Amino acid sequence: MVSLQCGDLLIEGESGSAVATYIRVKELDLIFDLGRCPMSFIGTEHVFISHFHLDHYFGLPIYISQRWLAGIPPGKIYVPKAGVEQLRSILDRISILDCGVVWDYQVTPVLSGDRIPFRQNLAAHVLPGYHRVPSVGYLICETREKLKPEFHGLPGKEIAELRRSGTKVTVQVELPLIAYLGDTQRVDPDAHPLLRQCKVLICECTFLTPEHRKRAERSMHLHLDDMPALLAAFESEHIVLTHFSRRYTPDVIRERINSVLSPDDRSHVQLFI
Ligand SMILES: [Zn+2]
Ligand SMILES: [Zn+2]
């Protein structure tokens, strides 16, 4: 299992094109995609699925059944709206085949533009994806209450008094922590006003060599040649590249990345291999 430290967040999992992608951020109690489900992921409560290619969601039956067997309440699974009924039907059939009853599970359909509050102080914004099947990405923000500017400089006593009298003295602000883009042919950095500033960006980079440029277009994936423009559009401290094609060995991946990215870009980039 790969494990990368990105500031305060530990990014764990695996990702290989057509094999399996599953990425956990334990500090945020969430998983991005679940192409397979290691036992260590069972206790994580929130699962955000980007699209219904097998390598991105086929760990769900294990995740659901293992929680069910252990008596853990159902996790909260978010999936693209197109396909949710087929998914439920598949899960129900696998469940009946497995144990004769339907597991208890919770699947919530999402659309680009949705905002999903979770835990006490987090929210997921659903981003558009551009792939061969309906696809989304997710931007996770921390929410905080901040004193409204008109009350700055007031003594604490007066602020407390205003609060008691029912005046709303704070406004909610969001800090963009991490974005996961799923499989996608292109990235719109303006898909959400906070996306460019996310501290960690997890981005696929399936194809790396000049002869695979056309293949990237056909299969609607990103190519290493897309990265310099993409990196210029983001202010992220950490860019994690994932989902490399099986055609490339780790040495080839490092060699290609080092030869195409500038040293400055390269210093922000970590490889999920
Ligand atoms: Zn994929
Ligand atoms: Zn895909």
Image: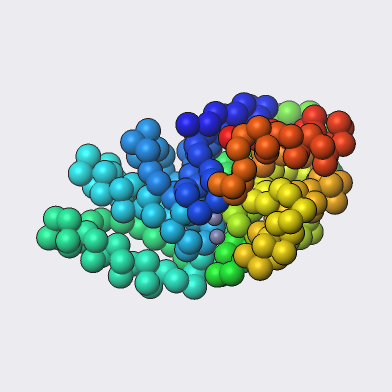
Taking the image as drawn, is residue 164 in sight?
no
Indicate whether 85 appears above or below 239.
below
Which residue shows up at 57% across the image and 41% down it? Answer: 121
Taking the image as drawn, is residue 6 in sight?
yes
Q: How many marks?
A: 0
* Nearest the eye: 192 or 147: 192
Q: Could you tell whether 88 is left or right of 234 in the image?
A: left
View quadrant of ligand 2: bottom right
Q: Give how far across and how far down residue 197 sits, in percent.
A: 78, 44
Residue 137 figure quarter: bottom right
Q: Give how far across and how far down residue 2 sits, in percent.
A: 53, 31
Which residue shows up at 75% across the image and 39% down it? Answer: 256
* Nearest the eye: 167 or 115: 115
Residue 188 figure quarter: bottom right
Quadrant location, the C terminus: top right
* Nearest the eye: 156 or 15: 15
Which residue shows up at 73% across the image and 49% down it? Answer: 209
Which residue shows up at 68% across the image and 60% down it? Answer: 216
Indicate whether 131 appears above or below 152.
below
Q: Give how far across and how far down residue 73 sits, in percent.
A: 29, 46
* Nearest the eye: 215 or 185: 215
Q: Give how far across and how far down residue 66 sits, in percent.
A: 26, 44
Q: Could you tell whether 136 is left or right of 217 in the image?
A: left
